[in-house]
Amino acid sequence: MSFIRLVLCFAFTIALFSNCENTQSKKNKQNIKTVSTADTLNVKNKASETISKKKAEVKKDSIIEEPFKLTNKNLIEFMTNYGKENPETLVKLKTIYGNIHIQLYKETPLHRANFIYLVKQKYFDETFFYRVAKGFVIQGGNSDRQEMAAKRFEIGDYTVPQEQVKGLKHTRGSVALSKQWEHNPSNRSTPFEFFIVIAKKGASHLDGEHTIFGKVVKGMKVADKISNVPVDSSEWPKENIFITAEVIR
């Protein structure tokens, strides 16, 4: 073999080796690039999923349920169900002058359920017998205490539809809820304030105006004692007559 042919053969071998090396290098670069892109997409997807999950958790945690409050819209449904689950009809009011037992009428289901509900919510425990109309009525279920106002706010803002029962009159010992006299054509009751008739001859002029929902079955002498306490010009007792209430049966 001549020297020239030997040189040409050697050059061809080097060129062939170099071409194979470049081809392999390109393949490796392509593989590296492909792997890198896939990994990046996976990381981005995982990051996006994590962020979405955290946003959902934050949104879920930020939803705070508002406490239940009574309104004129939900009152009838609530009290109807509450009355079925709480059928008690006898309540005891405790005062410094003694105890008064009130029998509640089943014939006035909304008023009965409302009174039982307020007793069990401990509402009356923040109130007084705040009005004494001599020889007429004593009225309870209100006070000038901040705790009472807070309790009313917690329970809700509502009135109770009138429930007139044929034959029930405002006789001595009758228990009824008070009402607003203005802008109240249907005689809806205020839910918190009740009165006991003290007058020996009753209070017939109130018949048809208020819902009578119970009567005193024990403790009228206590009610009479309360009706004789000293009062100011607005019929507010000069000494607070605190009430605590409990359901007997």
Image: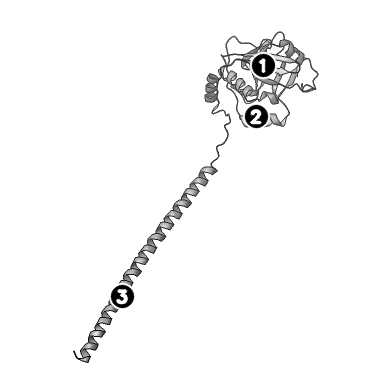
Q: Nearer the viewer, residue 38 or 7?
A: 7
Residue behind mark 3: 21
Does 25 appear above or below 217? below
Q: Nearer the viewer, residue 202 or 15?
A: 15
Amino acid type, mark 2:
Arg
Amino acid type, mark 1:
Lys
As drawn, the residue found furthest toward the left would be 1
Where is residue 71? Give x, y as percent.
57, 29
Q: Mark 1 or mark 3, which is nearer the start of the sequence?
A: 3
Q: How many marks?
A: 3
Please tell me which residue is depicted at 53% across the width and 43% down the height of the picture: 61
Residue behind mark 2: 152
**Quarter containing the C terminus:** top right
Amino acid type, mark 3:
Glu
Q: Mark 2 or mark 1, which is nearer the start of the sequence?
A: 1
Crowd around label 3: few <14 · some 14–19 · many ≥20 (10 Å): few
> Closer to us: mark 3 or mark 1?
3
Please tell me which residue is depicted at 46% across the width and 50% down the height of the picture: 52
Location of residue 79 (image quadrant)? top right
Q: Secondary structure at mark 2?
A: helix
Q: Is residue 180 left or right of residue 14?
A: right
Name the disc covering residue 92, or none. Answer: 1
As drawn, the residue found furthest toward the front would be 1
